[in-house]
Image (spheres, grey):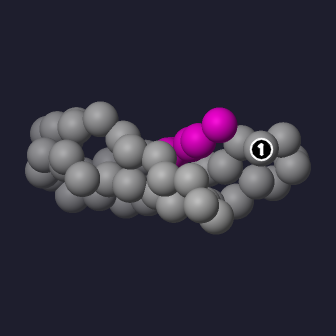
Amino acid sequence: MKDLELKGIYSAEVELSKATYSDIKVKIDDKEYVYPEMTLNEGKKLNLATI
């Protein structure tokens, strides 16, 4: 993940296939961010962000 503006907001673009995702986690230093379950009906590029 990248904090391009140094504001403590990290983001990353990911491409995911059609599926249900229930285990997406991002770890930055000692913090872990867990995303809620999501179902994609088609493949998509998503921008995951943390604050």
User: Horizontal and vertical percent for residue 14?
Assistant: 44, 59
Q: Label 1, secondary structure: give it.
A: loop
Q: Which residue is drawn at 65% across and 37% down?
A: 51
Q: Nearer the viewer, residue 27 or 40?
A: 27
- Does the magenta portion include 50? yes
Q: Is residue 42 visible?
A: no
User: Horizontal and vertical percent for residue 19?
Assistant: 12, 50
Residue holding disc 1: 8
The three-letter amino acid code for the residue at tag 1 is Gly
Q: Quadrant of the N terminus?
A: bottom right
Examine the image and state in which quarter residue 16 appears.
bottom left
47 relative to 15, above or below: above
User: Horizontal and vertical percent for residue 40?
Assistant: 19, 41
Main SS of residues in magenta? strand
32 relative to 29, above or below: above
Residue range of the region highlighted in magenta in the rendering: 47-51
Judge from the rendering whether residue 21 lies leftward or rightward of residue 35; answer left or right: left
Q: Which residue is drawn at 87% across and 49% down?
A: 6
Q: Residue at x 56, y 42 (%)?
A: 49
User: Horizontal and vertical percent for residue 37?
Assistant: 22, 37
Q: Residue at x 77, y 44 (%)?
A: 8
Examine the image and state in which quarter residue 28 appears.
bottom right
Judge from the rendering whether residue 38 lies leftward or rightward of residue 8; answer left or right: left
